[in-house]
Amino acid sequence: MELEHIARAVEVFRSARLPECNERAFMLYAVGIASAIARDSTGCVLLVEISDAPAALEHLRQYEIERLNKPPPPPPPPKLHPYAWAGSLIYALVVTGVAFAISNGLWRLDAFDVGELDAGLVQKGQWWRVWTALTLHLDGPHLAANTLAGVWFGYLASRLLGTGNAWFLVVLGAGLANWIEAFFGPATHRSVGASTAVFTALGLLSAYSWRTRLAYPQRWALRWGPLVAGIVLLSWTGTGGQSLEEPGGGAGQTVDVLAHALGFAVGLLAGAAAALEPVSRVLNRVPQWLAGLLALVPVVVGWIRALSS
């Protein structure tokens, strides 16, 4: 509005920047208060009729409060890595391939016995069992459940960390979890199955998502949501599993909650560490294809060592 249209003008806002005056003039126009902008040696002045001044000042005060209390913008979406499906495909091929080879007698007839997680033998130095046991399953439903869950959680983790990095951390973490259970547990404990790796992938995904959110101003529910979701999934799906009974007792279905919890805990530590800037820089220097090959090394070397024993 031109100055001459305001008979008795009074200043309600001043700024050195014209856009700030324009912004507030538009706000006053939206609430039905006419205004004009004048210039002087210090910048721009927003003027209104003297009768409108109290209402204009109150609206401007409320406007400043709203600007200061504006909710923070949502965090940018995380960078998603391509080819996440490749790692899940290789995982499925490995666990189903081992099952096919053993069930069809393509390996030694005692391949299952030399590859299972036998705590007593692990304590005596047979380290390879902590990885070979991840590829062994008791029956079709056991294999199908771990294959489907591993494919899904591994895919999601691969989208965030990259296929190679995700599976490298999952394989190492699952082997570590198996070793902890075997080395510090009873010597009679025996188990098989990829469920430890499945819950390592879940923990990795949960902690990495949680840790990357800490830099953004959010409500606590959003910030801690990934961890809460991971724990809920662990409680829902981690209370069932299969293991081998003590030697001589035959195969049976039991709940190996400790293996699931250890896998999840190791995954949490790995995911939180991978989200730290120094660790992330190191991981990003390694090509994803190379990290993926390194993830296969413990399993391949483990089976070579098991079948040659």
Image: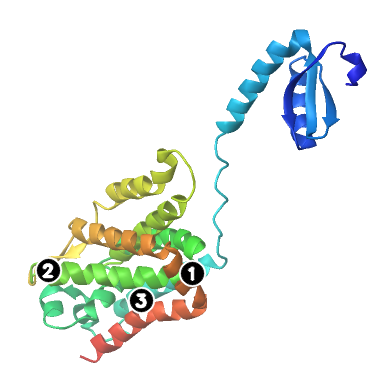
Pick the front one: 232 or 102:
232
Q: Position of residue 145 (x, y in %)?
A: 35, 59
Instruction: Tell me which numbered mark, 1 or 2, is placed earlier along the sequence.
Output: 1
Which numbered disc flags the more N-terminal residue, 3 or 2?
3
Q: Which mark is residue 278?
A: none
Locate residue 154: give its quadrant.
Answer: bottom left
Mark seen at residue 100: 3
Of residues 302 and 6, which is closer to you in this image? 6
Work out whether residue 305 or residue 180 is closer to the camera in this orientation and state it.
Answer: 180
Q: Taking 290 as reference, is 46 above or below it?
A: above
* Residue at left offset 30%, top offset 51%: 234
Q: CA distance from mark 1 to mark 2?
A: 32 Å
Question: How far from the left and from the top, in percent, is residue 202?
Answer: 37, 57
Q: Which image quarter is the N terminus in?
A: top right
The quadrant holding residue 189 is bottom left
| Residue that carries the numbered disc 2 in the rendered image | 184
Q: Quickly name the residue at label 1.
A: 163
- Three-letter amino acid code at disc 2? Phe
Residue at disc 2, secondary structure: helix
Say whether residue 58 is left or right of residue 215: right
- Which secondary structure lies at badge 3? helix
